[in-house]
Amino acid sequence: MARVVWNRAELQRLLASESGPVGRDLAVKGERVANEQRRLAPVSPDGSHGRPPGYMRDRISASMGRDERGLHVDIGTDATTPDGHPYPLDVEFPTRPHVIRSHGDYPLRDKHGNVFGKEVNHPGTEAQPFLRPSLEVLRRE
């Protein structure tokens, strides 16, 4: 008769440790998705929101984490406007037409110095998805 003994520590290392095969595979796949996001991310030649060109793309990362369900990889960009708005969401999804108001006693200007007054009706933006489509890199494996 055979005797089976479970080594719980080894099972934990294999399935739930960052250094085990599952954790290493998850890290590799997370980095593949992050690299695809960097490849797909649109880059404004002049920058945007007072940030240099490529700021959003350069802030893309993949990092391992753990929660109540186990290991996971957080993939994406933490780029924000100077006032803290996560503008990659405005790139991924379209924005509706909206009003932009000056936050002080001065008119709004564009990057070329054109003056528009204290309020501008922005026409909105089209979506330029790069986060969700980046997951396709895993489907192609």
Image: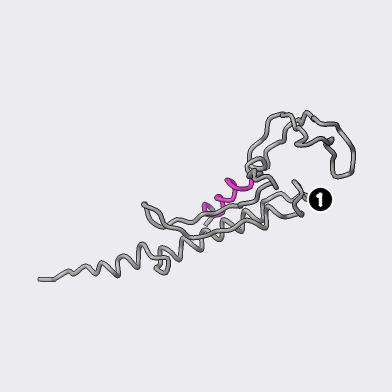
Q: In this rendering, would 62 be left or right of 7? A: right
User: Label 1: how many residues lie within 10 Å, few (<14), some (14-19) or many (20+)?
Assistant: few
Amino acid beneath label 1: Asp
Secondary structure of the residue carrying tag 1 is loop
Q: Where in the figure is residue 69, as x and y percent of width and height?
A: 37, 52
- 130 or 113: nearer the viewer: 113
Residue at 51% across, 54% down: 74
Query: Which residue is the site of mark 1?
Result: 46
Q: Given the current orientation, which residue lies at the most extreme left position?
A: 1
Q: Quadrant of the N terminus?
A: bottom left
Please tell me whether residue 127 belongs to the stretch shown in magenta.
no
What secondary structure characterizes most of the magenta part? helix
Q: In this rendering, would 99 be left or right of 4? A: right
Q: Where in the figure is residue 118, as x and y percent of width and height?
A: 82, 31
The span shown in magenta is: 129-139
Residue at 67% across, 54% down: 57
Above or below, 107 relative to 3: above
Classify residue 55 by image quadrant: bottom right
Q: In this rendering, would 103 be left or right of 37? A: right
